[in-house]
Image (cartoon, grey):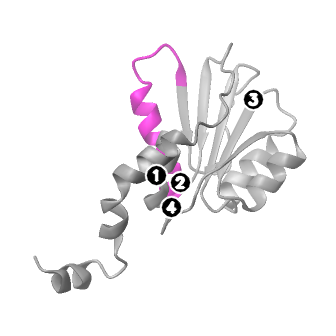
Amino acid sequence: MNSKELERIDSEKMYEVYDKWPQTAKESYEMNLEKFNVKDVDHIVFAGMGGSGTIGDVMSSLLSKDDIHVSVVKGYLLPKTVDSNTLVVLTSISGNTDETLTVLKNNLKSNAKFIAFSSGGKLQELSQKNNISHHIIPEYHSPRASFLTFLYS
């Protein structure tokens, strides 16, 4: 396949993003984000939509053999099983995904532990305002292109 055929098929040039994935993974891993204390956590909920929510599916699969309950939320409501031993991981590359923001807003008074990942936006603002650990994730091309950043950070 020549470059013209590739550009015809992939007009948004995702191939360029995927070609850089090894470097993106390395840079994300080297960000060396602050560790989150997961002591006493026996339930992890990943809340995110679309490409940003894909990390929840992958982590659920990776953790499926561990002795920890994992839920993936791609909507507005957390499971009723969320309690003080639950870690809610909020993912939204833009930081402005309505469903993810609603999950946080509706559960600020719960006993759950929260951690958020985004490139900024309202999720960063809301996290800072409510003393929730928030990590900046670089935004690449599209949410699905930022998948490795979620995975390796």
Labelled disc at residue 147: 1
The residue depicted at 55 percent of the width and 33 percent of the height is: 71
- Find residue 100 and report its horizontal and vertical position in percent: 67, 52
Point out the tag, 4 or 2, that comes first from the N-terminus. 2
Q: Would residue 61 be found to the left or right of residue 136 on screen? A: left
Labelled disc at residue 143: 4
Q: CA distance from mark 4 to mark 1?
A: 7 Å
Is residue 103 among what the camera can see?
Answer: yes
Disc 1 is placed on an element classified as helix
Q: CA distance from mark 4 to mark 2?
A: 5 Å
- Prevailing secondary structure of the magenta residues: helix
Q: Which quarter of the rendered picture does the C terminus lie within?
A: top right
Q: Which quarter of the rendered picture does the N terminus lie within?
A: bottom left
Which amino acid type is marked by label 4? Answer: Pro
Point out the tag, 2 or 1, that comes first from the N-terminus. 2
The mark closer to the camera, 1 or 3, is: 1
Mark 3, residue position: 113
Which amino acid type is marked by label 3? Answer: Lys
Segment tinted magenta in the rendering? 50-69
